[in-house]
Image: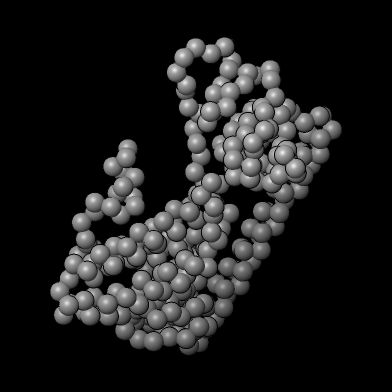
Amino acid sequence: MGGDREKLRGVDLPPLTLEQLTQEVRDVALQVHAAQERLEDRDFIAAVHAAVENMGRRFKDLLLALPAAEQNVAERALGRRVADVRRLASLLPRIPANLVVSTPDRQVSGSSAVGERRITGVSWTDNRVAPSAGLRVGGEVEAWCGKCGEAKTHNVIAMVGVEPKQVLCQSCGSRHTYRTGPARKKAVEGVAEATASRTQAPDREAARKAEIMRALGAEVAAADKVRVFNPKERYKAGEIISHPEYGRGKIENVLRASLLVRFPRSGLKPLSLI
C-alpha cells in the first residue's frame, strides 16, 4: 500500500518518453475538461488536481533526463500543452484535503464494551454523546447523518464556541447541522420538502441544458460557412467546424495548442492543434 502511494506521488517512477508523456498530457487534458462539467464532484476534482501536478512533475523529470539539445525540442513540442492544461486546471475549485480524504474507523487493541467504537483515539458507547472537548474545524466527530440514517464519522466545517455547528459526512458527503440523534418528525418533514424542491432544480437545469443543445444543433445545421477541422490550421471562437468523428460543432475557446468545441451530440470536446 505504501508503495502505491509513492507511485501516485510520482516517486520511483522512471521518466517517460516524449511520446508517452504526450499521451499522458492528452489524457489529463480530457480529465480537466470533464471536471469542468462535474464541479460538484469533490473527489473527482481533487483527483484531477493530483493528476495535473503529477503530469507537471513527469514533464520536469523528462526534461532533466534529456540532453541539452533535446530539451529544447521537448519544450517546443510539449511545453505549451502542459502550460495550457495547468492554466485550465487552475480555474477548477481547490478541495481541502481534510474534506476529501476520509479516515476509516480503526480498531484499538484490548477489550472494549459491546457497541463501543474507537475512532482516532476517541471512544464512546452507542448510548453516550460524543465528547466535544478539543474539537476544531477540520477535525473528526461522530454525528447523526440523516441521509445515511445512522451515526457516521463527520468532519467539522464550522464551530460556535467549542461546539460543532456544521459537519460534513465522510460516507455520503452531505453537509448538515451537527446533531447526535435523529431530527424530530417535523424537522424530518421539512427536510423532505426541501429535498423535493432540490430535486426539481436539477430537472430544470437539465431542461435548460437540453434547450441549449437543441439551439446549438439548429445553429450548426443551418450554418453556411463550415470549416473542415484541420489540426494544422488556426481558428477563432464562434466558428463552426466539421469533425470526422463528432460532426459539426461550434468553437467556444481557442488555446495555443488546442480548441474547446461544443458538439450537439457529444458535448464539449478538446481538439489538439499541431
Residue toward you, 135 or 86: 135
Q: Quadrant of residue 194?
A: top right
Q: Which residue lies furthest to the front in this view?
A: 134
Residue 269 versus residue 49 in the image, above or below: below
State the image coordinates of residue 51 (x, y, percent, origin top left). Answer: 39, 57
State the image coordinates of residue 173 (x, y, percent, origin top left). Answer: 59, 42
- The answer to whether 237 appears left or right of 184 in the picture is left
Q: Which residue lies furthest to the right in this view?
A: 186
Q: Quadrant of the C terminus?
A: bottom left
Across the whole image, how many numbered discs are drawn on residues?
0
* Residue under the image location 63 percent in, 58 percent down: 206
* Residue under the image location 30 percent in, 54 percent down: 10
* Residue under the image location 77 percent in, 31 percent down: 183
Observer able to see residue 268: no
Residue toward you, 199 or 33: 33
Residue 26 versus residue 126 in the image, above or below: below
State the image coordinates of residue 157 (x, y, percent, origin top left). Answer: 65, 46
Observer able to see residue 230: yes
Residue toward you, 250 or 142: 142
- The answer to whether 98 appears left or right of 19 in the picture is right
State the image coordinates of residue 137 (x, y, percent, origin top left). Answer: 63, 45
Q: How is the image coloured?
A: one colour
Q: In which quarter of the image is residue 2?
A: top left
Residue 110 versus residue 52 in the image, above or below: above
- The answer to whether 273 appears left or right of 194 in the picture is left
* Residue under the image location 41 percent in, 74 percent down: 84
Q: In which quarter of the image is the N terminus?
A: top left
Q: In which quarter of the image is residue 154?
A: top right
